[in-house]
Amino acid sequence: MSRMRRHAMRSCLLKLLTALSMLLFVATVALWVRSDSREDYFWWRASSEDPAQLVTSRGRMVFHWGVVPLPNTDEPPPGLLEHTTEPARRTGNFDVVSDDLDLSFAGFGTAVRTKSGCVVVPCWFVALLTALTPGWWSVRHDGRRLRRLSVLCAECGYDIRATPGRCPECGTSPAPQKTVAPQPAR
């Protein structure tokens, strides 16, 4: 496979992952905002036995596996993948986070038992992680755009104002640039 083709495939894959990460970022922020008034339960079953559950509640994402807390139901929904929602509870004894869970470090927490467990991650952290790739891409893309529009070499980024005919760093001849007529002062 040629170098240009590998570069094109890598670029396409990066754009796809960036778009997916941006979509996850938007979904995370939407669930984070919604978690103040609603609790969203995403259930799935890997086997016929114990389900797993992802809950957004009170600005946090809680992942349960094995024995799962059940709000207002006797058993989990029957499907392979289900979504249910409940009003956020500000009072009462039900919470999606078990009492033995220590949330002392910035809202993070874990509780692992023999066949079940719980991991709590604040929504702000998940939003930050999913925003890293789109942020990196936009900074990188902006730098490339500035390089094309400015007096920097398109290959290596070297300033070619002193030698506009050829880059002294890498030897590349720059493409002819469009000149823009200066605007008259008002």
Image: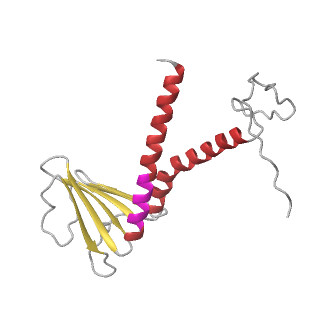
Q: Nearer the viewer, residue 85 or 118?
A: 85
Q: Quadrant of residue 121?
A: bottom left
| 141 up-or-down from 50: above or below | above
Region of the chain picked out in magenta, as a range? 23-32
Q: What is the x, y in percent for residue 30?
A: 40, 64
What scheme was used to colour the molecule?
A: secondary structure
- Above or below, 93 against 25 in this view is below
Q: Position of residue 129 (x, y in %)?
A: 48, 52
Look at the image and tell me whether residue 102 can be seen: no
Residue that appears at 32% across and 68% down: 99
160 or 96: nearer the eye? 160
Q: Position of residue 82 (x, y in %)?
A: 20, 58
Q: Is residue 162 visible?
A: yes
Q: Quadrant of residue 108?
A: bottom left
Q: Is residue 162 left or right of residue 96?
A: right
The C terminus lies in quadrant: bottom right
The residue sitting at 34% across, 80% down in the picture is 90
Q: Is residue 31 left or right of residue 75?
A: right
- Rendered view: 159 above or below 83: above
Q: Main secondary structure of the magenta part?
A: helix
Front residue (pair 71, 131): 131
Residue 85 is covered by the magenta coloring: no
Q: Is residue 27 magenta?
A: yes
Residue lying at the far top in this picture: please name it: 1
